[in-house]
């Protein structure tokens, strides 16, 4: 499914400039901000956020490997390594928040499918598939969720972490759709159909990673409670039912956008 890659463009340059302009060290970003209460639910919720951001690092790295395999230019490769660096920063910010809320959980419990280590094995998947899987699906859902959480969160320290993450993700999402818009029209209809099939698998998966709707009942109750309690304390989550509704609506929008590109 190899296609000709687009040349470096202003959006990718903007991404790299924005990052080099950042001076604040991630780990110190929340120092000196209003203290956080101790909350078992919120520290566990933000531990999950940390794992989720860390899981984006291997996903983006797979795109970097595919870009090199497919002969992309340095500007394109640079844009993606910058995204990987942003994801590390999001993980650091989330981890600092989890620590401040009572302690970061190193151990990923059973039933969580986005354990970063399991996603790090090299995969021989083409750029266009990563652009759609990681960018159009994961990043777009992530952005919608973080935006909704930011709107509902009162604690200033949690808001800062959400806001910092939000700014980067908005740019990542724009880049993902731009690359999808350039690459997908070059695919045959058969290739688009298999991309559509892959999209349906991803939709299922997102219900058990970003959302809780696809989880087995016992795990779901546990994960819902974390979100509900974190939401009640206004520390960075929405109630689980609301988060799942945001995800469902965003997935519908993604499918509509992809359908316009011939991916069904
Ligand atoms: Fe991120
Ligand atoms: Fe991202």
Image: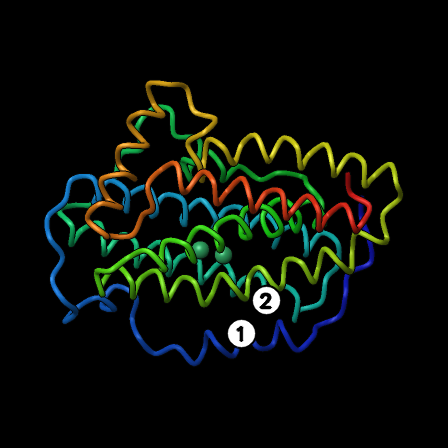
Give residue 202's position: percent from left, percent from top: 60, 35
Q: Is residue 15 above or below residue 210?
A: below
User: Could you tell me how far apart the alpha carbons at marks 1 and 2 are, in whole angstroms?
Assistant: 6 Å
Which of the numbered marks, if any, corresponds to residue 79? 2
Classed neighbour count for the residue bearing mark 2: other residues with Cα under 10 Å, few (<14), some (14–19), many (≥20): many
What quarter of the picture does the N terminus occupy? Answer: top right
Classed neighbour count for the residue bearing mark 1: other residues with Cα under 10 Å, few (<14), some (14–19), many (≥20): some
Give residue 7's position: percent from left, percent from top: 75, 70
The structure residue drawn at horizontal position 34% and vertical position 23%, both measured from the top left corner, is: 219
Q: Is residue 250 above or below residue 211?
A: below
Inspect this view and state whether residue 105 appears: no
The structure residue drawn at horizontal position 27% and vertical position 34%, both measured from the top left corner, is: 107
The structure residue drawn at horizontal position 71% and vertical position 46%, both measured from the top left corner, is: 256
Cβ atoms at labels 1 and 2 below 8 Å apart? yes
- Label 1, on which residue? 16
Q: Is residue 251 left or right of residue 32?
A: right
Could you say whether the residue bearing mark 1 is in a helix, strand or loop? helix
Give residue 67's position: percent from left, percent from top: 68, 55
Give residue 51's position: percent from left, percent from top: 36, 43
Q: Would you identify the image quadrant in which residue 198 lies?
A: top right
């Amino acid at each position: 499914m190899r296609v000709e890659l687009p040349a470096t463009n202003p959006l990718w340059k903007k991404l790299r400039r924005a990052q080099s302009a950042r001076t604040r060290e991630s780990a110190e970003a929340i120092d000196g901000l209003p203290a956080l209460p101790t909350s078992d639910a919120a520290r566990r919720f933000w531990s999950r956020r940390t794992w989720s951001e860390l899981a984006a690092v291997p996903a983006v790295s797979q795109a970097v490997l595919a870009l090199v395999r497919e002969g992309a230019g340095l500007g394109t490769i640079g844009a993606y390594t910058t995204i990987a660096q942003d994801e590390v920063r999001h993980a650091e910010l989330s981890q600092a928040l989890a620590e401040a809320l009572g302690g970061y959980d190193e151990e990923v419990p059973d039933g969580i499918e986005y354990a970063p280590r399991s996603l790090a094995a090299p995969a021989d998947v083409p750029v266009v598939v990563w652009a759609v899987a990681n960018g159009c699906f994961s990043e777009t859902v992530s952005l919608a969720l973080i935006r909704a959480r930011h709107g509902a969160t009162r604690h200033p320290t949690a808001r800062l972490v959400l806001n910092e993450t939000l700014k980067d993700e908005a740019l990542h999402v724009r880049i993902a759709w731009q690359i999808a818009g350039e690459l997908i029209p070059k695919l045959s209809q058969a290739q688009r159909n298999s991309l559509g099939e892959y999209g349906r698998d991803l939709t299922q998966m997102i219900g058990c990673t970003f959302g809780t709707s696809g989880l087995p009942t016992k795990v779901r109750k546990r994960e819902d409670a974390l979100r509900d309690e974190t939401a009640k304390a206004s520390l960075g989550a929405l109630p689980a039912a609301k988060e799942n509704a945001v995800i469902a609506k965003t997935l519908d929008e993604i499918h509509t956008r992809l359908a316009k590109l011939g991916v069904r």
